[in-house]
Image (cartoon, rainbow, N blue to C red):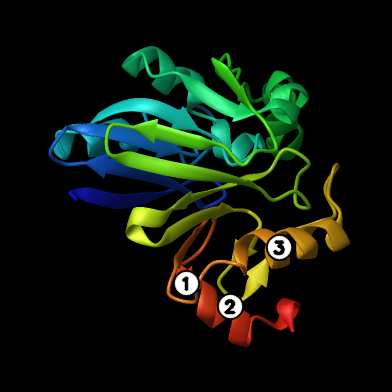
Amino acid sequence: MNIEIHSLVLQPLGTNSYLIGDRAAGQAILIDPGGDLTAEFAELRPPRILQLAENLALRIELILATHAHWDHVLSSDLIRKETGAPFQAHQLSEPWLQEQPESASRMFGAGLRFPAAAAVDRWLTDGPEEITLGSIQLETRYTPGHAADHLSFVLHSERAVFSGDSLFAGGIGRWDLPGGDQPQLLASIQNQLLTLPDDYRVYPGHGEATSIGHERRSNPFLR
């Protein structure tokens, strides 16, 4: 297969956005269309994701959100309109998407204006579901605990999982935000992620990539 995984770290919260590309077909899935804000956090810049896709000769044909916290969907509307790609998120994401401008403004000050999130073309369920674009096949796994609407996406062909804000290198997601639940988060990781083989690469929503085996052995929250 010609499946490639590319990532960008987007500000202001260092959110990882991922492009999964099928080089032969020129198609790509975008996971977590985060924002690219100016240093003053005053405006949303044209996302570097679009430039990366263009440089790689990939067409973004599907946009997915691991969850609807604003830093993971800040560019969703802009990218959806620019590419025409449908946007998919968990069915519990709706209230978070609706209040994106307000939740972002609360963090950075009421004087700043943030864009609305994209309209959702298809709501995903607890699943598991299979999402297919050409030769790219993703399996959804419902991993709540950081957020009630949280999904992880498994790319079995590349032995990879996109864990969003559930599992990080050496850590786990916050559970002190609205909808967070620590026991639920730990159960999600144990039952949905650690059931994958050790060699599966973990691509988290923030920070460096890791592996299932490394986190199983060394993550202090999972001991």
Neighbor class of circle 3 (other Cα within 10 Å; few <14, some 14-19, many 20+) is some
Per the image, the residue denoted by label 2 is 215
Amino acid under disc 3: Asn
Left or right: 51 with respect to 138?
Answer: left
- First in sequence, mark 3 or 1: give its number: 3
Left or right: 35 with respect to 47?
Answer: right
Amino acid under disc 2: Glu
Left or right: 75 with respect to 49?
Answer: right
Q: Quadrant of the C terminus?
A: bottom right
* Residue 46 numbered tag: none
Amino acid under disc 1: Thr
Per the image, the residue denoted by label 1 is 210
- First in sequence, mark 2 or 1: give its number: 1
Q: Residue at x 50, y 72 (%)?
A: 197
Residue 128, image x, y percentages:
61, 42
* Vertical position of residue 197 compared to residue 26: above or below: below
